[in-house]
Amino acid sequence: MTDLDAVDPLAPVRELFDLDDDVVYLDGNSLGAPPRAVADRVQEVVRQQWGRRLIRSWSEGWWEAPQRVGDKVGRLVGAAPGQVAVGDSTSVNIFKALMAAVKGTDRAEIVVDAGTFPTDGYIARSVAELTGLELRPALPDSLELTERTAVVLLNHVDYRTGRMLDMAAVTEQVHAVGARVVWDLCHSAGVLPIELDALGVDLAVGCTYKFLNGGPGAPAFLYVPAAAQATFEQPLTGWTGHRAPFAMDEGFTPDPGIARARVGTPDILSMLALDVALDVWDGVSLTDVRTKGLKLTAYFRSLVEDLPGVEVITPDDEWRGHQISLRHPDAAALMDKLIGRNVIGDHRPPDVLRFGFAPLYNRYSDARRAAEALAEIL
Ligand SMILES: Cc1ncc(COP(=O)(O)O)c(C=O)c1O
Ligand SMILES: Nc1c(O)cccc1C(=O)C[C@H](N)C(=O)O
């Protein structure tokens, strides 16, 4: 333990996670660690809900789970209840959001962050091809938006560098030309204070298996603000988004609210694992999480920035998420060696080492142990 851990107000929260003490886990920005309560809950869902209640469970909490769990996610991203649906993958939700954002537009282009996580770019390309709009990759610092722009898809925190965009300023910039913005919150949900409602964000998506600790393949989320729901027409008109799914109507009439963002039968085991995983935030302030995230990353940075051959590519100011990325020509081999010593981060091609810091369970001693291991290997 370091002195910093001794005075960390979030230190007790680590006990809520099932982590081995000899492992330094710095990859919660790719797959979050399991909250202890998840295993029992999944067993209860299988044995009691599915096992004993059988199909009756659909009307005993399963059917509404995408909206109920959505409200829990909403609390972490500044969305009032009734505006977040949990389900599908982030990729599918990006598709739904972009298609809805350009539906009926007379504008010509979709703008996507040129350095985006690949799936966002791939899906934006498909949406452009399906709708006949142009796709224009642009750097966030020079978006060059005009009245031709229909929608802009951006990552709040860049997966490779950890750079965070100014959501307030960029949202305003997009709105100034009358376009819509879709924010991908994969690398920020759960660790940064986000104010979707207050900033008037048009649409947002994110995954729940990173800092939200929902587990591998946990369902993603889609935010549609209440005022935009009546006109939100997404392309995947599955029956669970229908106003009256059990009427089994021939024609599709969307639900008037957030349920219209749903598509098919929700993955209940993953959904309810996420549900209980989100309880680790009870009583936790996102401001404390953010403060600790900045301190952890600053501490780690101070320990590694002068190591030979290493270049820190994560911004040094507050415009960063909760990771530190290092460039090194032998990044892949270095990460293999670190993992061999139970220090788990990841490598992104061609030459980036990523270390993600999850303030709910990472300690300052994790940062120190990782930096010491890296120094020894180098
Ligand atoms: C920014 C971003 N968007 C999307 C995804 C993933 O999308 P999906 O959940 O569909 O695999 C990731 C990570 O995998 C990501 O980092
Ligand atoms: N979603 C992932 C997966 O299914 C397997 C391995 C890694 C991932 C990731 O989340 C990668 C991650 N989005 C990244 O920032 O690189």
Image: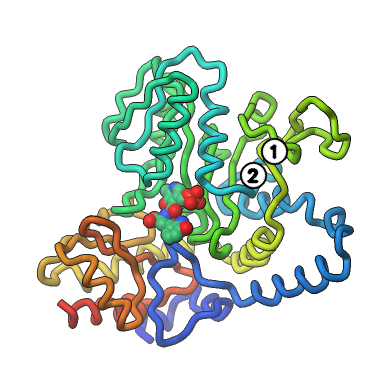
The dot on residue 258 is 1
As shown in the figure, which amino acid type bears the numbered disc 2?
Answer: Val
Image quadrant where residue 230 sits: top right
Q: Is residue 25 left or right of residue 14?
A: left
**Contact check, label 1 and label 2, Cβ < 8 Å:** yes
Number of numbered discs visible in the structure rendering: 2
Q: Is residue 269 left or right of residue 368?
A: right
Secondary structure beneath dot 2 equals strand
Q: Is residue 43 visible?
A: yes
Q: Position of residue 216 (x, y in %)?
A: 54, 63
Image quadrant where residue 279 sits: bottom right
Q: Is residue 330 left or right of residue 103?
A: left
Image quadrant in which the N terminus is located: bottom left
Q: How many neighbours does mark 2 have within 10 angstroms: few (below 14), some (14-19), or many (20 or more)?
A: many
Q: Earlier in the sequence, mark 1 or mark 2?
A: 2
Above-or-below relation of 339 to 254: below
Above-or-below relation of 108 to 97: above
Color theme of the render? rainbow
Who is closer to the viewer here, 291 or 365? Answer: 365
State the residue position of label 2.
84
As shown in the figure, which amino acid type bears the numbered disc 1?
Answer: Ile
- The residue positioned 52% from the left and 47% from the top of the image is 90
